[in-house]
Structure formats: C-alpha cells, structure tokens
Image (tube, rainbow, N blue to C red):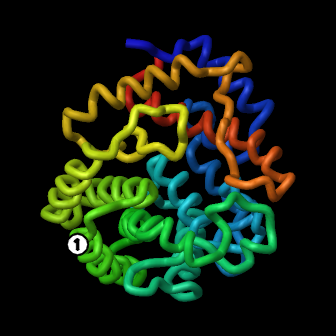
C-alpha cells in the first residue's frame, strides 16, 4: 500500500507554511498535530461578518466580502474536518456557531428546508461560474449545501438550543424530497454524504441513516467515476466518502494511490480546475490559493484512510 512518507509530510508542512493562506496553514498544522485544533477558531474570525455569516473569500472561488450560505457551509466543513462538535467547551466556538446559526435560520431562513447557496452580491465580485446569482445555479446546487448544513447544525449545536430543533424540523422536509428524487447532482451527493456522517456522529435518526445510505449507495454505483483528474466527475472520495459498502473500497484506494502519485515537484498538489469562463483576472490568484487548500483536503483524506507513514 502506498503511503505519504514522513519526509514528504515534513516537506509538505514546510511548503504549506510558505505558500498558503493562514487558514490553510492552520488546518494543515491541526491535522498533522503541530497546532491545537482550536487555532482554527481564531483563523475563522478573519472571515466572519457582523451579520454572523462568513465571507471574504473563505471559499476561494468566490471573492465576495459579504456573507453567503455557501461560505458558512465552508466554515462548518472545516470545523467538522477537525472534529468539533457540541461537546466543545470553548467560548469562541460557541460564539461562532451561535452567530452563524442566527445568520442561517433568522437572517436568510431556508424555504422548505432549502437555502439558496448564493447571494445577489456575488455578482458584484469575482467568482467562478457556479457562484453567479441566478436560477440556473440554484437548480445546479439543488439540496446542497442545505442537507449538509442541517446535519452540521445537529452536530455543532446543543440539543437544548432552538437552532437544533429548527434543523430537525427542516430536515424532515429535505429527507422527504431526498427519498422521492431519482437523480442527484454531484453537489447533492456530497451534501448527503456529509449529512449521513453528522447523523452517525450524533446517533440521530438511525432508521433514516440506513435509508439514506441505501439510496445513496444504489445511485452512486451507477454514476461513480474513475476520472480522478476531473474535479467535476463523481469521484469515489467525493460521492462515496461516508458510504461503507465494500464495492467502493477498491475505487477509494485507487483514488488515494492517484493522490500519492500526483504530488507536484514543489511538494504539494497543483490545482487544475477552472472558473468556467474567462471573465475575471482573479481566477489566477484563486488557482494559487487552491494549492494550499487542496493540499489540506488531500492530506485529510490520506490521514482518514491510514495512508500516512
């Protein structure tokens, strides 16, 4: 089995410290154990707005300084990667979660369990094509990141809080739609993998956990792709990340091998994605930022699947 060697890990940590955003340095350092995970809370404060949401390009492909639902999703995704949950006894954590949930449930409340991930002011700033505020992209995202955000709320908020109860209520509507759907976008598959993981961590809705996994597994088997170089493909570690069916084991291992085989000469992973049009010069700077963020994501996967020496 291929592993990321200790020498490669040391070089990667050094390169990340030289070439990445502060938040990506923080994430990598927490994942490799050189910094406490609570440092992420301080790093996230650089992206928090007065309305409690997140902006300022926390998600690299959207330069909007204003808050949006998708930027909150990105913040919650990072917190989940480092293992935060409602048991966390930290004042700054409580403040971040409470303010973010106030933004989500009071300032931009979901409609029948679903948020629009984009906001009108996206169109005033540089962004990739999927973050243009329009009806087409609302359909593209579908139930993403709504399903993931509802799961994160149940994971991060104490059961006695109003936001927890709101999330449970909204989730009923989202699950009804999920069970009735026959097709899913890649975004939705990622989101329901995330929801499944949150429900497992909180031991909630056990019967629904089984039904969600069964439906996802059946669908993913038909659409999964081994085109690892294509970020838009239904790659195993995106759409089957939290699915336990053994049919995915070999495919996940192939993608992990691919990750280890494609580390660039500078010690990190290059980014080969595109914004989908030639509209903003900021795309070039985004590609440079993605090198650090992508390295964090890949390192997390290698660590999760025991591929570190």
Give the camera-side residue of 265 and 141: 141
Q: Identify which residue, 52 or 261, lies in the foreground.
A: 261
Q: Examine the rendering and report whether any part of residue 153 can be seen.
A: no
* Percent x, y of residue 213: 22, 53
Residue 251: x %, y % from top left: 33, 29
- What's the residue at 22%, 59% (across, down)? 212
Q: Is residue 22 left or right of residue 206?
A: right
Q: Work out which quarter of the rendered image holds the N terminus and state it.
A: top left
Image quarter of residue 49: bottom right
Q: Quadrant of residue 143?
A: bottom left
Residue 50 picture quarter = bottom right
> In the picture shown, does residue 241 fall above or below 74?
above
Please say if 37 is above or below 298. below
Residue 71 appears in view: yes
* Circle 1 Cα neighbour tier, 10 Å, few/some/many (<14 / 14–19 / ≥20): few
Q: Residue at x 38, y 85 (%)?
A: 112
Q: Which residue is mark 1?
A: 180
Q: Nearer the viewer, residue 40 or 191?
A: 191
Horizontal relation, residue 25 to residue 169: left or right: right
Locate residue 150, reporting x and y percent: 39, 70
Where is residue 37? Give x, y as percent: 56, 45
| Outermost residue, left side | 207
Q: Please tell me whether mark 1 sits on a helix, a strand or a loop.
A: helix
Measuring 48% from the left and 32% from the top, which residue is drawn there?
A: 228
Residue 212 position (above or below residue 254): below
Q: Is residue 22 left or right of residue 257?
A: right
From the viewer's perspective, is 68 left or right of 63? Answer: left
At x 75%, y 38%, the residue is: 20
């Amino acid at each position: 089995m291929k592993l990321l060697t200790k020498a490669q890990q040391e070089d990667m940590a050094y390169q990340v410290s030289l070439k990445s955003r502060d938040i990506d340095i923080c994430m990598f350092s927490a994942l490799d154990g050189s910094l406490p995970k609570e440092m992420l809370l301080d790093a996230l404060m650089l992206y928090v707005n007065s309305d409690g949401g997140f902006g300022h390009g926390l998600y690299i492909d959207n330069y909007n300084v204003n808050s949006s639902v998708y930027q909150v999703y990105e913040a919650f995704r990072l917190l989940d990667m480092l293992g935060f949950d409602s048991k966390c006894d930290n004042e700054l954590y409580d403040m971040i979660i409470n303010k973010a949930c106030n933004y989500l449930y009071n300032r931009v409340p979901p409609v029948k369990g679903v948020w629009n991930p984009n906001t009108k002011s996206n169109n005033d700033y540089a962004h990739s094509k999927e973050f243009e505020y329009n009806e087409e992209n609302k359909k593209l995202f579908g139930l993403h990141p709504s399903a993931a955000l509802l799961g994160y709320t149940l994971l991060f908020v104490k059961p006695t809080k109003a936001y927890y109860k709101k999330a449970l209520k909204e989730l009923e509507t989202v699950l009804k739609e999920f069970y009735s759907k026959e097709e899913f976008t890649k975004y939705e598959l990622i989101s329901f993998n995330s929801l499944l993981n949150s429900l497992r961590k909180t031991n909630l809705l056990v019967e629904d956990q089984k039904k969600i996994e069964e439906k996802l597994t059946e669908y993913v088997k038909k659409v999964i792709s081994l085109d690892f170089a294509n970020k838009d493909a239904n790659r195993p570690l995106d759409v089957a990340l939290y699915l336990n069916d053994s049919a995915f084991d070999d495919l996940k291992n192939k993608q992990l091998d691919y990750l280890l085989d494609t580390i660039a000469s500078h010690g990190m992973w290059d980014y080969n994605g595109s914004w989908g049009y030639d509209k903003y010069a900021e795309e070039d700077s985004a590609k440079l930022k993605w090198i650090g963020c992508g390295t964090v994501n890949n390192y997390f996967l290698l660590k999760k699947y025991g591929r570190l020496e």
